[in-house]
Image: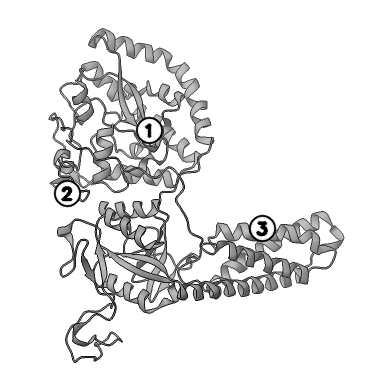
Amino acid sequence: MSTDSTDDSREPHSATNPATATAEGPARTTPVLPRPVSGTGGEPVPQEGRSAPLPLPSAREPVALPPTGPARRRRTGGPALLTADLAGTAAAVLSCAGPHAAPVLLAPVCASLPVLCARAGLYRPGLDPQALDELPAVGKRAALAWCVGATVLAACDRTGALGPTGLLAGFAVNTALVCALRALVHGVRRRRGRRRPRSALVVGRGETARAVTAALVERPRYGLRPTALVEPGPDDAAAPGGSGGTGGSASASGSGSTGGSDGGKLPGTGRSEPADGAAAHPPLPVLSTPEEVAREVARHAVRDAVFLQSPWEDPHSAAVAGMLGARGVDGWLVRPGCALGAHGGHAPSGSRRPDEAHLWGFSCRRLTLDCPRPRTGLRKRLLDIALVTPALLLAAPVLAGCALAVRVLDGPGVLFRQERIGQDGRPFTLLKFRSVRPADDHEAATRWSVAGDARTSPVGRLLRRTSLDELPQLWNVLRGDMSLVGPRPERPYFVGHFSRLHPGYAQRHRTPVGITGLAQVHGLRGDTSIADRARFDNHYIETWSLWQDVRIICRTAASLFRLEGR
């Protein structure tokens, strides 16, 4: 089974004193400076056998968990593109198929093409979509749709089956009509964007931010009007020469005054230098905190945010991205160079997505700002019940033996009960066999356990070594508090603390918490890197499958026989 911080005392890895981190008041906090590290986790060296209570902060900040309801979303042109696809497909079927074949062929082709296009992301176009760029993707889907239609037609009417010539003609006409209608839709959207550009924020620092802002201001074809620059982080982290908070401003000209004659050309820029050092465009306010960004979103009805790097790389940008995603703002990732992968890496040749394009030479793709939830449905719960019910029956003698050993050797209080945070931030009572000597409520809520804790009893060390102390959590799974597989639950105190220090930690609560998880089967148990655990947990959530749960359960069972507990 998995192991984590429980009723023991440990100082958490990569954490400063929570009291000083929260009692100072402002939401912005200075990034934690690295301490000496060991191993591959990039975290401070644990001090075996030492423990100290972490005092409760005087003014505890609320835990920022992912929104539980759907965010407000603006229309992206999907309905118009769907109408264009259906109209082009219907016209192609009626013109290329005979009067007897057309009624049978119409339904399967018109039903297949939109489904295939939706799965390819063709109804969520990029910032500057072009019909010719979409033609290969549309052509492939049209060919598949016509093959489906021809199969249905052959099954229904063998005499009126569509031959190779008719199939090829229908596919070609369908692709041409759909792309022509899509070009019309994209043209209408571009004209509308020029007349009424959408308010947007540019999130980033330096010359790249100014260049991207200038490109959006000077080229209305993209349909975005920057209203502010966002430089996430504390005030003292502002870029040199810029402003780090409200009241600062930045020019949208994309180049500063670097010398030369008034009104002359700046070498290598292709633009004129502003006379007397004046900005070519009105300066934009520079924002830094989520509160300032939220006010800007409300004031200007901001609908888009252009990020110059992945927002999940530091906690300040992650906080801004989470706030924007909860308000239904669309995100775009813009960087110099070739097409970007999901985390900023280079995409392989030929793998270009429909929403990937360029913004005046900068690689541009759509960026998800809110947290997608795994579509587990009833499958995960049914798997839990199917495995936990017989497991409780088979483990009954082991449970009784563990309870008897704890009662005889360590005295009363066989079970340890502690409040933990589950899915969507809901608290529940977690059950374990007691493995350390009793502590008061304050100590149990704020102490982080370390290996070799002197308070661990001999029977407790055996239970933890074999992970048998986790067996009572099978009852939590049967009740629905937990799942067999999922992120390990933590105490409310540490959930709030880690959520402020580590980007992505709060997003772990999108799914039911579990007894074991992807992080645990990779050795991230006990006093290990919180940042690594959060990264593994979010990867598990975003790539969830029933088979992945089965694999993790099998690997956890194998680790029990190798005695890989704490």
Query: Secondary structure under badge 3?
Result: helix
On screen, residue 129 versus residue 505, left or right, reads right
Q: Position of residue 447 (x, y in %)?
A: 19, 29
Which corner quadrant of the image does residue 278 belong to?
bottom left
Q: Position of residue 33 (x, y in %)?
A: 14, 50
- Kind of residue at badge 2: Val
Q: Position of residue 332 (x, y in %)?
A: 39, 63
Which corner quadrant of the image does residue 267 belong to?
bottom left
Residue 339, compared with residue 330, is above or below; it is: below
Residue 354, compared with residue 252, is above or below; it is: above
- Kind of residue at badge 3: Ser
Q: Give me the C-alpha separation between circle 1 and circle 2.
A: 29 Å
Residue named by callout 1: 426
Which quarter of the rendered picture does the N terminus lie within? top left
Residue named by callout 3: 112
Q: Give me the C-alpha separation between circle 1 and circle 3.
A: 41 Å
Q: Marks 1 and 3: CB-CB under 8 Å?
A: no
The circle drawn on residue 136 is: none
Residue sitting nearer the eye, 152 or 430:
430
Residue at 17% over, 49% down: 32
Residue at 42% over, 76% down: 220
Residue named by callout 2: 32
* Crowd rating for badge 3 (residues with CA inside 10 Å; few <14, some 14–19, many 20+): some
Q: How is the image coloured?
A: one colour
